[in-house]
Amino acid sequence: MDQGLLDWKGLDQPKFDRLVELLIYRMHRDSPGVRVEALDGRGGDGGIDIGVYVDAALSHVYQLKFFPEGMSGGHRQRREQVRKSYIRAAMLRPTRWTLVTPGNLTAQERRYVRGLAKNDRIVTAAMGRVELDHEISKWDDLQQAFTREPLLDALKSVGMASAALATPSDLHKQASAFGTRIDGRSAYWGTAVTIDGPNVTSVLHAKHPQAAELEPLLVELVADPAALHPDTRKQLDDFFGYGLGKKVALPSDAVASLKLTGPEWFAAEYARDVSIELHNPRQAMEQLDVELREIGDNNRVVSSWRGTVTGGGVGTSGSALLISVPGGIQLTFKLPTDASAGGRVNVARGPFDAGPRDTLRAFRLLHRIESRARFDLALNGRRVLRFTVNDGTYVAEGDAYWQQVADDLVVIERELDLDLRMPMELTGEQRIRIRSVRLLLDGRCVLVPGMSSAQATLTGTHDKDIETFLTEPEGILIIDGAFGFELDGTQISLPGVKVFHPRVRAANGSDALDQLRSGAGAGFVLHLEPVDQTPFRSFVSDRWTDDTAPLVPSPLEIPGFDEHPAIAAIVAEPAS
């Protein structure tokens, strides 16, 4: 009798349940927002064997019933079991309910299943051997996993039990034998094979130092230039010409032909039906001390930058060297075999990968490169070439902003003895705070961001000075404090800050005065606000170098930021 791809009726119930659970899981696992849950304790689980949830809502119930004989004739009573299971599931309001059995249901049995829903608005269906065969045909590993025991028995009967890979030692024995057969294909070339499901990767390596001469292997690749993306063409030129790049991928439509010439085990031909990845077998680069030296008049070194060799290569056109400079700069030197052709230096920029000082120096290097300065490249202290980059724009429009950030953080690091990283992004508030701290450290006066009022608590002291402050229309307020914020997990705190405003008034001064005169002023909260509605100012007293100069807040001068409108008004005020 035809059993299909797998003898479903020949399985016992535990194996049937486990296989169907795995199968249904794979049917739904790649759908977005879907979760599949197989529930144990059948009969007491509300009728649900497997629930499929879409965005946390129950969508589909699969009811597993191990009825090899069906639900007709002497097994007609099983229909009542199915009906009760459906009723329990329907209470949870799925949109679909499917009965799963190991055999094909008769037409009458299928009509019974479809009629269970009645007015429930639930789509009911049956899943038997035909549907199960269709789904499991997509998963070879599931078929093999659940047919191992009959295969193992058969192999044991002919003395080949290890071929079933039933134990770890069987796998080792078979793989070792396979490896020996592969190794025996050639006395000069070995093959390392990696298997990942249906994907097989072979990597050749020489077993003899003269393998290329004694058993030459020729690879002829013809690419279709019209099918190559310009970036891919450049990668190919660099790959073959200078040995650059870790790999280059060629899509199948770009491979006009690929011919492998050599012994029978190697020879093959392909045309537009194979995609290719060319890998560069990079060797470990020698540890070199790299220095870029800017050369001024009289061949004098005016500045220098340290770097690291990150790669290199040799190809048909010449050699190449890749150098990384802290701060996100990568330099690629291409040196043709024909020295008269002249070399080329490519400059690329990556993300900030260093501290503020190195980042600031990287910006300066970009400026010097763009200004056509002369440089020497020195390896281990010995000059190997002199170069000038004659074309290209390397200073971007937004660099002024980040260069100022780096400059500010260099000062903050030095003055506050901190070790900071260059941030990858900043909010507007963070940028203003960084700039404000820098200016305060420079001995400048700045506006206090976001501070437009203040509070003070009276001690109860009542004297002439207090009464004058509470009754006069304006006065000077000076508060001792600190200025601080957090940047990428590092707390930046500037002590000794004086917060002040030259023209404040007590909004509730008359109430405060009444409380003081009655003897109940202690603890009274005084609300202070600027008369001219301008923000409070701040400075650091031991960094303010000129005690006679007016405390006028400095503009922040952040590229791309508008100054606070109060700055212009304050600067225009006559000095008092």
Image (cartoon, grey):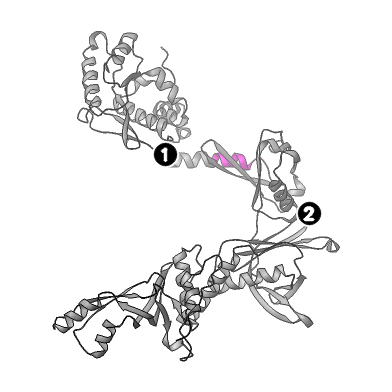
Question: Is residue 227 in sight in this rendering?
Answer: yes
Q: Position of residue 248 (x, y in %)?
A: 66, 47
How busy is the neighbourhood of tag 2: few (under 14 within 10 Å), some, or many (20 plus)?
Answer: some
Residue 365 relative to residue 36: left or right: right
Residue drawn where x is 54% and y is 72% of the image: 557
Amino acid beneath label 2: Thr
Of the 4 image quadrants, the one containing the N terminus is top left
Residue drawn where x is 60% and y is 39% of the image: 181
Q: Which residue occupies the foreground of this view, 78 or 404?
A: 404
Q: Which residue occupies the foreground of this view, 404 or 480?
A: 480
CA–CA distance between discs 1 and 2? 51 Å
Q: Position of residue 396 (x, y in %)?
A: 63, 62
Residue 316 shows which numbered tag? 2
Amino acid beneath label 1: Thr
The answer to which quarter of the image holds residue 363 is: bottom right
Residue drawn where x is 50% and y is 62% of the image: 425
Q: Main secondary structure of the magenta part?
A: helix
Instruction: Give the number of the mark in front: 1 or 2.
Output: 2
Verify whether residue 459 appears in magenta.
Answer: no
Q: Which residue occupies the foreground of this view, 291 or 497?
A: 497
Q: Is residue 203 above or below residue 56?
A: below
The answer to which quarter of the image holds residue 346 is: bottom right
Question: Is residue 159 in sight in this rendering?
Answer: no
Q: Which residue occupies the foreground of this view, 487 or 438?
A: 438
How busy is the neighbourhood of tag 1: few (under 14 within 10 Å), some, or many (20 plus)?
Answer: few
Q: Position of residue 127 (x, y in %)?
A: 36, 20
Numbered marks: total = 2
Q: Which residue is mark 1?
A: 167
Residue 77 relative to residue 472: left or right: left
Magenta segment: 176-186
